[in-house]
Every structure is written in C-alpha cells, then in structure tokens.
Amino acid sequence: MAIDWSTLGFHYTETDYIVRSACHNGVWEEPYATKDKYLHLHVSATVLQYGQEAFEGLKAFRGVDGKIRIFRWQANAERMRRSAEGLYMCPVPDELFGKAIRLALEKNIDYLPPYETGATLYFRPLLIGTTPRLGVGPGKDFEFVVIPSPIGPYYPGKFHCTTFIVNRHVDRAAPFGTGQFKVGGNYAASFRATEAAHAMGMDCIFLDAAKHKYIDECSAANFIGIKVGTKGQSTKYKEIEYLTPRSSAILPSITNDSLMTLAKEKGYKVTRRHIPLEELSEMHEAAACGTACVISPIDKVFDPDKGKTYFISEQPGPVLSGLYHALQDIQYGRAEDKHHWCEIIDR
C-alpha cells in the first residue's frame, strides 16, 4: 500500500476492512471486520423502500506525541441513537459503537495518516433497515456498518473563506421533522439547492422552512456568527458574542458544541437563538462548522431574492481562527484535553 497523503481530499479512499454487525429481534451480534465492501440487501428492504437510514461521521488523529486520538465518539454514538429512535430503528448500543470504531481503526491502522500531513482517518458509521416489506412501516432487522477512509485536510492550502448564497425555494428540513437527526433524506433534499450553488462557485444557506426568515443551516453544516460589540466599532471592544441558531430542524453539531465550549472558556458570550438573515450585517465573522471542515469561514452572503449582499470578512477573522486552532490543538495532542473528548490509543 502506498498513499500520497499530500493529495488526499475529502473523498473516499478504500481501506482493507469495514466493520459490520446485524440486529435481529432487538439483539445485536458482535461486530466483525470483513473485506467485503458490499451490502447484500433484499430489494424490498426498508432502507430502500422507506429511507430507514442514519449515519455519522468522526475522525481519528495521529497526534504530535505519536498517540492516536479518537475524537468524541461517545457523542456520535449518542446522536446516532437519537437518529435511530427518530426513524423507529433499533439503536446501536454505545459499547458496540465504540468497539466497532476501535476494530475499524485496528484493522486499518496502516491507513491512519502521519501527524505532519494534517490528514486523518475518517469513520462513517451507517445504520440501515434490512427487513423486506412493501406495506408502509418500519423494519425489524438492521445492519450497522463502519466505513473507514483516510481523508486530507479540508484546507490543503491556506485557511480561506467561501461565499454563500441564500435559497428560499428549497427547504432542507421542516420544524419537528427529521432535521434534528442525521439521516440521508435531509441531505438528498438539499441537493437541488447545494448543487445549483456549487455551479456558481458558492455554497448554500438555508432559511427556516416555516417563515423563510431565520438562518437554518449552511449547506450540510451548522452556522456560526461572531459579533464584536457593534459593527463599525473597534474589534478591541471587550464583549465577543458567539451566535448560533436554535431550531428543531437543525442537526446538533458535535463540532459546534465543542467550539461553544471553547468559546465560553475564552470568555466569549455564547448565544443560541433565532438569527434573522438581516443580522448578518452586524457580524464581524461568520462560518459553517462541521466534522469535515471544523470551521469554514464565510466572506459574504448573497441574497438573490432581495438583490442584497452581506459582506462579512474577506479573510478568516481572529475569533474563528483562534477557535479553529484551539480545537485542532486538542485533536492533535498539542493542547491539554480538559474535557476528556479524546480516547487515546497508545500504539
């Protein structure tokens, strides 16, 4: 095996093994590693007929000290459990989830990128309904799969900004629907908007489905806004506010949760509330955040329906850049892990 770590992006690179476990009558089997990368499904499986599916995403890092750190897998296990319950699937026990991640790491250890590359080993846990049925209803049989893949840094060059465009004509998820769960249907529902934005060299901001007034999500990520006093005042103003939307249609981001914790430690005011789109004019910094990018800064947001552009910052700002590096330092073992977010594997 020879991998050019420097050319890896956020795309799938096949490894030697995946890890699988099946559930029948509420009982999960012991997870096992296999080289078979294909699922053998009945054509009437509930995942195919009715979209009974949930997934996760997390990373393992080779630290500056040579140790391996799996970042907050327990939070991913908890979120997958909530997603499973939301789609009436049998939840994957936390212990089994963790065991499967460790086994996937162990069997594919040669695919864990070296520290100095800035690349990581990404895990995609997947839960699907496998019961054959045609009548509308949930399945009773399930399969849990962990798919590992080495990925490169989201920003292989300089940490840079992205332009976003507002879309009022496609709703990603409805309030009290499946938006709070990490399920494939939410992402498929967004493709019409995100692919149109990508064709214009931008990414997409979704507004709330009820009023199309408040910021919902940034493509497939949570939104962060930074306000430093009042727009136009000196950035030396003491109060820095970290703003992120509160909504039943938004996926609870583990990355966002981590960044909010670090922001509080730095003395920033952290606020979760409805954020009107027009409030972008008051923000000094803004970004999308998620597992893949950690933080993806926003330079400006174009609203085609109103013919207005909100200019944020041409370069990544000091507040979000500081939070980005603070989180990366914990993940790579360059800073103390005060919150015990990382499970350390010494090998």
Image: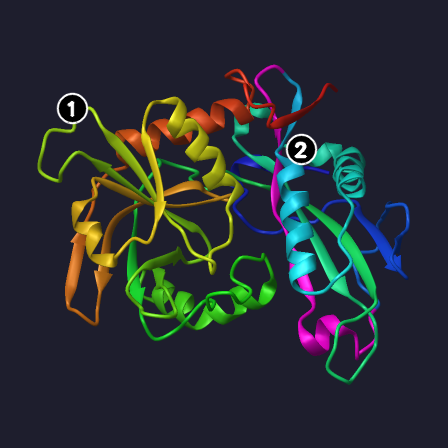
Q: Earlier in the sequence, mark 1 or mark 2?
A: 2
Residues shaded magenta: 41-65
- Where residue 312 sits: x, y (%)? 20, 46
**Mark 1 to mark 2: distance in Å?**
41 Å
Identify whether 14 is placed above or below 114.
Answer: below
Residue at 21% from the left image edge and 43% from the top image edge: 283
Coordinates of residue 128 in the picture (x, y in percent): 74, 63
User: In the rendered view, does 254 fall on the left or right side of 50?
Assistant: left
Residue 77 found in image quarter: top right
Q: Is residue 130 above or below residue 49?
A: above
Which residue occupies the extreme left position in the image?
A: 232
Quarter of the image containing the C terminus?
top right
What residue did someone put label 1 on? 236
What residue is pinned by disc 2?
A: 112
Snapshot quadrant of residue 217: bottom left
Looking at the rendered structure, the secondary structure element under dot 2 is loop
